[in-house]
Amino acid sequence: LPERDRTELKRRKLLLEVTLKSYWIRKGSAFSTAVARQETELTPEMIATGSWRQRPFKPYNFSALGLPPACGHLHPLLKVRSQLRQIFLEMG
């Protein structure tokens, strides 16, 4: 259809354009029917035996945030000071 007719039909809602996408899926160079577990850590045993050379390792994620530090505890001397203040508040 010419562009002018196509826009006119779209405006009157008599034409609906649809985009179709298709993909070709083929076996890649790393294709395998068995699921191989990737190693996450390098152990001293792997280094001693040299088995780390044949094992696949999981890529390291440098942008991961990690666990938040366990903090928020009072210093022991500050803890004693807060307890003393609590005692004086109860007495006075």
Image (spheres, rainbow, N blue to C red):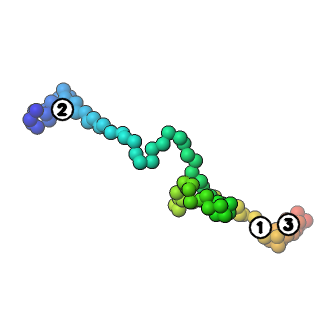
* Structural crowding at the residue carrying mark 3, measured as other residues with C-alpha within 10 Å and reported as few (<14), some (14–19) or many (≥20): few
Alpha carbon distance from label 3 to label 1 = 12 Å
Q: In which quarter of the image is residue 45?
A: bottom right
Identity of the residue drawn at 10% across and 32% down: 1
**Badge 1 amino acid:** Leu
Residue 71 lies left or right of residue 11; in this view the side is right
Instruction: Judge by depth and name the residue closer to the eye, 81 or 17.
Output: 17
Which residue corresponds to mark 3?
A: 83
Identity of the residue drawn at 54% across and 54% down: 56
Quadrant of the frame with the C terminus: bottom right
Which residue corresponds to mark 1?
A: 74
* Structural crowding at the residue carrying mark 2, measured as other residues with C-alpha within 10 Å and reported as few (<14), some (14–19) or many (≥20): few
x, y (%) of residue 59? 52, 57
Q: What element carries label 2?
A: helix
Instruction: Judge by depth and name the residue closer to the eye, 18 or 62.
Output: 62
Residue 10 got which mark?
A: 2
Residue 41 lies left or right of residue 82; in this view the side is left
